[in-house]
Amino acid sequence: MKQSTICLSFVALALMLLLSGCGGISVKKMTPDIDTALITRFDKSINVITAAGARKGVFGGPAMVSNDEFTDALVATLKKANLFKEVYKNSKSDYELYSDLVAQGQGVSLNYESALVVQYRIVDPKNNEVIWKKGFNSRFTVTVLQSFSGAVRTTKAQEGSVRSNLSQLIQSLSSAKLP
């Protein structure tokens, strides 16, 4: 009787530890801390098309950012940056922004490193001409010292790689020349 109680206690403890870090990926935590432009850089609106190419996570595997989560973080970042007159999601505008998640992965050891490659392109919807195109490769590492829970490390690593990628996008758009 005593052995079964001890065994049950260990199972309950293991389950608590396993579930303690499973909060999910946060769009807010993927949005980079950036300076907001005081004056809108482009006197045009931009429509963010839902991202494509995200890997699907598997049960027990590393957390992966979905197309919708990435798109929501991209929209929030563009609005925060104030580079465009208006930022829309799947609506009519002067420009359309497409984002393709070309590669998404994560190395798993004591330190979790997430890698993300995104190809962006801005299109003039009047003639479907690509007016700006650029890709960014980002990495983010979360150590076991930063978080003991593997679930928390994988989530933070994914959020960090998206945050880094979006920071690179904003930095590049800040100096871009668009018609």
Image (cartoon, rainbow, N blue to C red):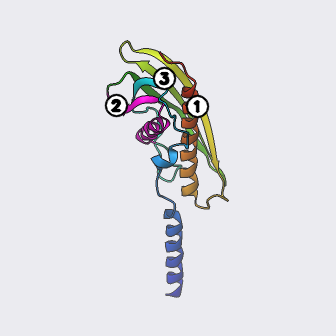
Q: Indicate the position of residue 7 as horizontal and vertical percent values.
A: 53, 78
Could you classify mark 2 by the number of other residues whose Cα lies within 10 Å: few (under 14), some (14-19), or many (20 or more)? few
Question: What is the three-letter code of the residue carrying label 3?
Answer: Arg
Picture residue at 43% right of the left edge, 33% below the top: 51
Q: Nearer the viewer, residue 7 or 59?
A: 59
Q: Which residue is under mark 2?
A: 90
Picture residue at 46% right of the left edge, 53% below the top: 24
For label 2, the SS is loop
For label 3, the SS is strand
Q: Are marks 2 and 3 in contact (CB under 8 Å)?
A: no
Residue 58 visible at all: no
Q: Is residue 16 left or right of residue 140?
A: left
**Residue range corresponding to the magenta coloring:** 66-91
Locate residue 171: give its quadrant.
Answer: top right
Q: Indicate the position of residue 78 as horizontal and vertical percent values.
A: 46, 35
Question: What is the three-letter code of the residue carrying label 2?
Answer: Asn
- The vertical placement of 55 against 86, above or below, is below
Q: Is residue 151 left or right of residue 108?
A: left
Q: Which residue is under mark 1?
A: 171
Locate residue 158: give its quadrant.
Answer: top right
